Image: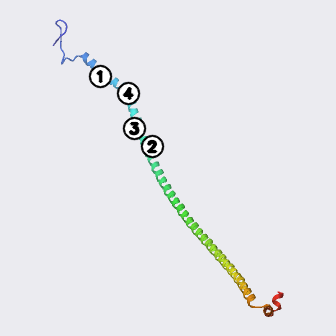
């Protein structure tokens, strides 16, 4: 028993009365109402934010996957182009080597032809020089022989003998030699 003002007693079971139950019920209803209102104004926006974030992440993952696929396809295309460029470069180098060898062979052939012309010209010039030297030697021999013959003749032959030799030589040569 509880004493309330001077001498009054109040019997409550476990200290629960109707006022307490009514207050407790109102408090519980107020808490549930507050929870519902807070849920509507706080939890729903938070849920919406989480849903939006989840969708954004899923979109970003899908975009990333698409980007990866595009990057993979671009990489394959790039590698294909690199192979094609390498092959083209090899073809160009091969062609350049062939042209270089052809030019080398052409230059060698031209050099051999030029060397053959130079050798032929040198041979002809040497032959002409040899002929000229031979002619010069013959002229010298004739000049020396004539000088010697002149000295020998003038010393040993008199005038009548000289005239006889000249006449003999003229007869041997004949009149046709002197006329031509």
CA distance for labels 1 and 2: 48 Å
Give the residue pinned by disc 2.
63
Q: Earlier in the sequence, mark 4 or mark 3?
A: 4
Q: Earlier in the sequence, mark 1 or mark 3?
A: 1
Q: Nearer the viewer, residue 37 or 176?
A: 176
Position above or below: 121 against 152: above
Instruction: Point out residue 175 in the picture as x, y percentages from the top left corner.
Output: 83, 91
Q: Residue at x 65, y 74 (%)?
A: 121
Instruction: Point out residue 126 in the picture as x, y percentages from the top left corner.
Output: 65, 77
Instruction: Point out residue 101 in the picture as x, y percentages from the top left corner.
Output: 55, 67
**Could you say whether the residue bearing mark 2 is in a helix, strand or loop?**
helix
What label does residue 54 carry, if any?
3
Give the residue pinned by disc 1.
28
Position above or below: 144 against 69: below
CA distance for labels 2 and 3: 14 Å
Mark 1 or mark 4: which is in front?
A: 4
Q: Earlier in the sequence, mark 2 or mark 3?
A: 3
**Could you say whether the residue bearing mark 3 is in a helix, strand or loop?**
helix
């Amino acid at each position: 028993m509880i004493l309330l003002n001077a001498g009054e007693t109040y019997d409550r079971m476990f200290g629960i009365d109707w006022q307490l139950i009514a207050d407790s019920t109102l408090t519980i209803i107020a808490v549930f109402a507050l929870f519902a209102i807070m849920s509507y104004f706080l939890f729903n926006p938070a849920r919406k934010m989480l849903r939006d974030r989840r969708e954004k992440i899923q979109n970003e993952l899908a975009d990333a996957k698409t980007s990866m696929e595009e990057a993979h396809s671009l990489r394959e295309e790039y590698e294909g182009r690199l192979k094609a460029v390498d092959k083209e470069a090899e073809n160009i180098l091969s062609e350049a080597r062939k042209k270089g060898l052809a030019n080398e062979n052409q230059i060698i052939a031209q050099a051999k032809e030029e060397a053959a012309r130079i050798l032929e010209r040198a041979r002809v010039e040497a032959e002409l020089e040899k002929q000229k030297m031979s002619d010069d030697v013959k002229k010298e021999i004739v000049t020396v022989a004539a000088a010697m013959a002149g000295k020998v003749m003038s010393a040993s032959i008199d005038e009548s003998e000289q005239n006889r030799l000249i006449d003999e030589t003229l007869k041997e040569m004949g009149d046709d030699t002197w006329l031509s």
